[in-house]
Amino acid sequence: MRTKSLKKNKINVVTLGCSKNIYDSEVLMGQLKANKKEVVHEEEGNIVVINTCGFIDNAKEQSVNTILEYAQKKEEGIVDKVFVTGCLSERYKPDLQKEIPNVDQYFGTTEMPSLLKALGADYKHELLGERVTTTPKNYAFLKIAEGCDRPCSFCAIPLMRGGHKSTPIEQLVKEAQGLARDGVKELILIAQDLTYYGLDIYKKRALAELLRELVKVDGIEWIRLHYAFPTGFPEDVLDVIKEEPKVCNYIDIPLQHISDDLLKSMRRGTTHKKTTDLIHKFREIVPQMAIRTTLIVGYPGETEAHFQELKDWVREMRFERLGAFTYSHEENTHAYSLEDDVPEEVKQERANEIMEIQSQISWELNQQKIGKVFKCVIDRKEGNYFVGRTEYDSPDVDNEVLIDATKYYLKTGDFTQIKINQAEDFDLYGEPVTEE
């Protein structure tokens, strides 16, 4: 008995899903650390906290499988306790409690104080913005708002995350200063919808204002924008991107589709013409900008003609970065009342077709980089290569720059000038340029 009572608990936080979940896990770990708890991220621990994703079918399946895996480990005595939090838990708590009762407790997305209590810790309000980052030391996510007020028909996020709630500018600046002190050089701004930022607390869109404050933070060299919504895009943000060298010439703006019929059914509040005009405006004001977007194929009612229109538009727009997803029929969303009438294999074929068009575009755009020199940040060493990125690339989703580690030595986290000498569809190869 005595040995059991002396056993030191180690809490293992397992994160599934998007960058918003990574951020939430980091905040949880910061709280646990402040409570003098031993906490690790995706390593061995006798107490497990699974931060789940409930966005689309694949993500839900992965989350359920992970819960089942740890419930089994608990059964076998490998781990002592299993707690589940995050979006899946917020959305399906009663079902999960019934189907996987071997989990100690389930918590929603807003129940961190209760989760901490279950882990024998107190929620410390004074820790605002303090967290244990799990990303490579040189970059970190900065969540500027929670939730979403948009009515998109296919999306379950408001069900799991609630309405839009901006974090005040001074609080975000303080958090950025803390990250900079810890050696972070790149901030990746995330939210369900960046362009809505400030409307709730300042009664106006304030993303440009926030950026102008964040660029003043010493030590931060790059600021990157993720998840901007096209409708009502605040154009003063383009001026900031153009004028402020620290704000990357990069934007992630999920456009979802281009057919007027489908945009209307998706409740996106825009049209083919408005969307195309917006992209042209981006390129006119910030000609160097890399635009990343995501598209949904197989949405209810998507005909061959709608899909053809989408393909033609992708070819015409030549996005620097693009991802295509198959439509997922989510209960309690507005689109759930529509018939999910595009067969699964057709959805998959359409996604593959879009990605084939994109990989050709990406290859052609990358060929234009050969012989040019780019400022790159070195994220990590993998095998015989140092892996870096230009300002036009976000970690994990975009192009990487590979530098031969058998010939050159580079320090991870450092910025360095790299000359590109070879390019594939999603990878660039280069060598450091020595200062003359």
Image (spheres, helix red, strand yellow):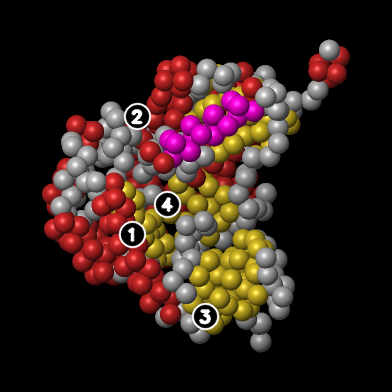
Of marks 3 and 2, the one in the foreground:
3
Residue 64 lies within the magenta run: yes
Mark pair 4, 1: CA separation: 24 Å
Residue 34 falls in which quadrant of the image? top right
Q: Amino acid at mark 4?
A: His
Question: Residue at left 67%, top 19%?
Answer: 120
Task: Answer left or right for 233 relative to 408.
Answer: left
Region of the chain picked out in magenta, as a range: 59-73
Residue at x 35% of width, y 29% of height: 159
- Mark 4 or 1, which is nearer the eye? 1
* Residue 77 visible (yes or no): yes
What amino acid is at disc 2?
Answer: Leu
Query: Label 1, on which residue?
Result: 352
Mark 4 in CB contact with mark 3 (< 8 angstroms): no
Assign a secondary structure to mark 4: loop
| Residue matched to label 4 | 226
Q: Earlier in the sequence, mark 4 or mark 1?
A: 4
Say which of 248 and 388 sits in front.
388
Q: Which residue is mark 3?
A: 422
Disc 1 from disc 3: Cα separation? 26 Å
Q: Nearer the viewer, residue 353 or 255?
A: 353
Q: Circle 1 sits in a helix, a strand or a loop, which is it?
A: helix
Amino acid type, mark 3? Gln
Q: Measured from the top left, where is residue 209 in percent x and y? A: 41, 50
Of marks 3 and 2, which one's residue comes earlier in the chain?
A: 2
